[in-house]
Amino acid sequence: MITNGMIAPVNLTANVNNLNQLQNKATPAEAAESFASFLKNALDSVAAQEQNVHKVNDQFIIGEANVNDVMIASSKAELSLALTSQVRNKVIEAYQEIMRTQL
């Protein structure tokens, strides 16, 4: 895999491994806590990518980065934000469906 020192690779396998551990928890409270930490890590990753875009953009302005680095970093951040927004929409839809369920 080709990596660039200015752009950190996205580590999705660690998040998937955390999800696999959710199935092995004994109590619902522990599972909820693990899921909350998974969400926090995912959102922190999106925020870190946004900060990376700002850093690379500043480096481009002073001439220390090329336009390719800026475009790659901004595309990764844009895709992460789009994914986060789609996941949020699906969670809201699921919540609304649960609320519509009649007992």
Image (tube, grey):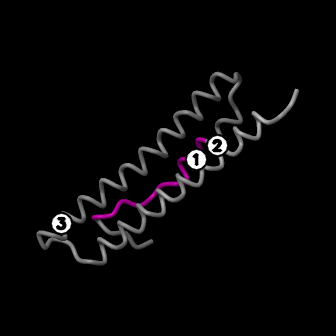
Is 13 covered by the magenta stretch? Answer: yes
In percent of width and height, residue 44 lies at: 41, 44
From which residue to which does the magenta span run?
Answer: 6-18
In the image: residue 67, left or right of residue 102:
left
Query: Quadrant where the N terminus lies?
Result: bottom left
Q: Secondary structure under badge 3?
A: helix
Instruction: In the rendered view, tell whether residue 85 sits above or below residue 78.
Output: above
Residue at 18% x, 63% y: name it: 58
Query: Marks 1 and 2, Cα distance to the nearest angstrom?
Result: 6 Å
Q: Secondary structure under badge 2?
A: helix
In percent of width and height, residue 76 lies at: 42, 65
Query: Marks 1 and 3, Cα distance to the nearest angstrom?
Result: 32 Å
Q: Which mark is residue 59?
A: 3
Q: Which residue lies most toward the right here?
A: 103
Type of the residue with mark 3:
Gln
Look at mark 1 in the image and give the residue it sits on: 88
Instruction: In the rendered view, tell whether residue 93 sits above or below residue 102.
Output: below
Look at mark 2 in the image and give the residue it sits on: 92
Residue at 45% x, 58% y: name it: 10
30 vs 51, nearest the viewer: 51
Answer few, some or many: residues within 10 Å of disc 3's Cα (few below 14, many 20 plus, some between 14 and 19): some
Query: Quadrant where the C terminus lies?
Result: top right
64 vs 23, nearest the viewer: 64
Residue at 35% x, 66% y: name it: 73
Instruction: In the rendered view, tell whether residue 16 sits above or below residue 35.
Output: below
Type of the residue with mark 1:
Arg
- State the image quarter where residue 67 is shown: bottom left
Marks counted in the figure total 3
